[in-house]
Image (cartoon, grey):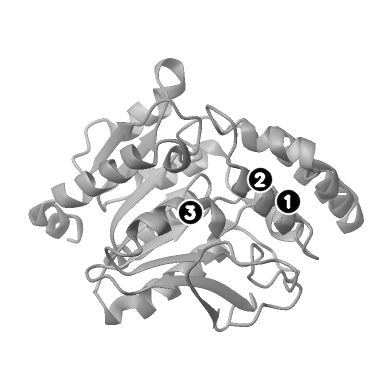
Amino acid sequence: MSPSPGAIELGPAIDGERRRWRAEGHGVGDVCIYAAERGRGRPLVLVHDLRATSSAYEMRPLFECFRWRRPTYALDLPGYGLSQRSSLPYAPALFAVVVAELLRRLRRMDPTVDVVALGRGCEVAARVARDEPGLVRSLVMLEPSGLLPTRGALLEAMAAHLGRLLGDGAARALFGLITRRTLLRRSLGARFHGAPDEGLVDYARASAQVPGAHRAPLATIANGPRGPEAAMLYRALTVPVLVVHDVHGADAIELEAFLRGRANRFAVRVSPTRGMPHFERRGDTVAALERFWQSIPRAAWDQAMR
C-alpha cells in the first residue's frame, strides 16, 4: 500500500499488512487499514480514540496480541494517521458510516464482528452497534467517553472551541501549539499511571506534523456529542458490552447507571491505569477481553437481535 496524499512522511503505526481502502460516496478519500489474517475465527476490529494525535498506534498492543489468534484489523479513521486528511465535517457519525462499511465487507469471514474501541472511538463503535446491531456481535469499550472522566483533553477542547470561532488558520496554529512535544507528552502522560509509552509519544508527534492533521480532531471535538449525549447512546445498545476502566466512587456514577439492571452490560476494573489499560496492563486487559468473549451466551445474543 502506498501512503495516502499528505501522509508520505509518516511511517506505519502497526507492523501489519497495510491496505488502502476507499469508502465510497462519503468523500473521506483513502482509509488506511492494518490487517492480520493468519488466525482463524471471528474477525476483530480495533477503533482508536479521537484525540488530537490519535491513530491506529493507540490500538497497537491489542493488534500485536491478537494478530496470531484471529483475523484482526485496525484502521486509521478518516483524517487520522495514514488515512487521507481532507477538509470535511468530521464527526463520530461520519466515522461510524465508514466503520459500518468495513464490517459489512468482513461478512465474508463471519456474519458478525467483535469490536474494541478506545475513548471517544467508543462513540463511533456504539453508533454502529446501535444502528446496525446485526454487524456487531460484541463491543468492548476501553475508558469510554461519556461514562468516565476524560483525562488530558482540556487543551484540545480549548483549541477546538477557539479554532471554530477564529477560523482554519487559527485552528492550525493552536493545534501546532498543543502538539509541541512538551505539551503533547503532558497530555498523553495524563492518560498513564506511570510514564507514557515512548513509542506512542513519538508517533503522536510525527502524526501531528502531517499537513491537515488539525482538521479531523478539532472538528470532531467541536462537532461531537457532549458527555450526556454519549451516555444516552451507550444506553441504547442491545449487543453484549464490556467496559474496561479504572474508576471508583464519584467517578463511577455514570458507569454504574449504565450497568444497572441490564444483563448485556459488564465492566471490569484494570488497575492501576489512567486511560490506556492495554498499554500499562496489557496481560490483564487481554485476559478480561477473552473471558468476556468466551462468556457471551448464545441465548443472550439471540435475544438481543430480536
Which kind of residue does numbered mark 2 sit on? Val
Left or right placement of residue 88 versus residue 149 in this view: right
Left or right placement of residue 134 versus residue 144 in this view: left
Q: Is residue 225 above or below residue 81?
A: above
Mark 2 touches mark 1? (CB < 8 Å): yes
- Which residue is depicted at the point 17% across and 61% down? 306
Which of 8 and 304 lies nearest the eye of the viewer? 8
- Which residue is depicted at the point 28% across and 46% down? 289
- Which residue is depicted at the point 14% across and 47% down? 295
Left or right placement of residue 166 versus residue 37 in this view: right
| Secondary structure of the residue carrying numbered label 2 | helix
Which residue was labeled with disc 1? 205
x%, y% of residue 50?
Answer: 59, 51
Quadrant of residue 129 within the rendered picture: bottom left
Which residue was labeled with disc 2? 201
Q: Which residue lies furthest to the left in this view?
A: 299
* Distance from Cα at disc 3 to Cα at disc 2: 14 Å
Quadrant of residue 21 within the rendered picture: bottom right
Q: Quadrant of the N terminus?
A: bottom right
Q: In this view, does 301 lie above or below 189?
A: below
Which residue was labeled with disc 3? 59
Mark 3 touches mark 2? (CB < 8 Å): no
| Crowdedness near tag 3: few (<14), some (14–19) or many (≥20) residues, C-alpha within 10 Å | many
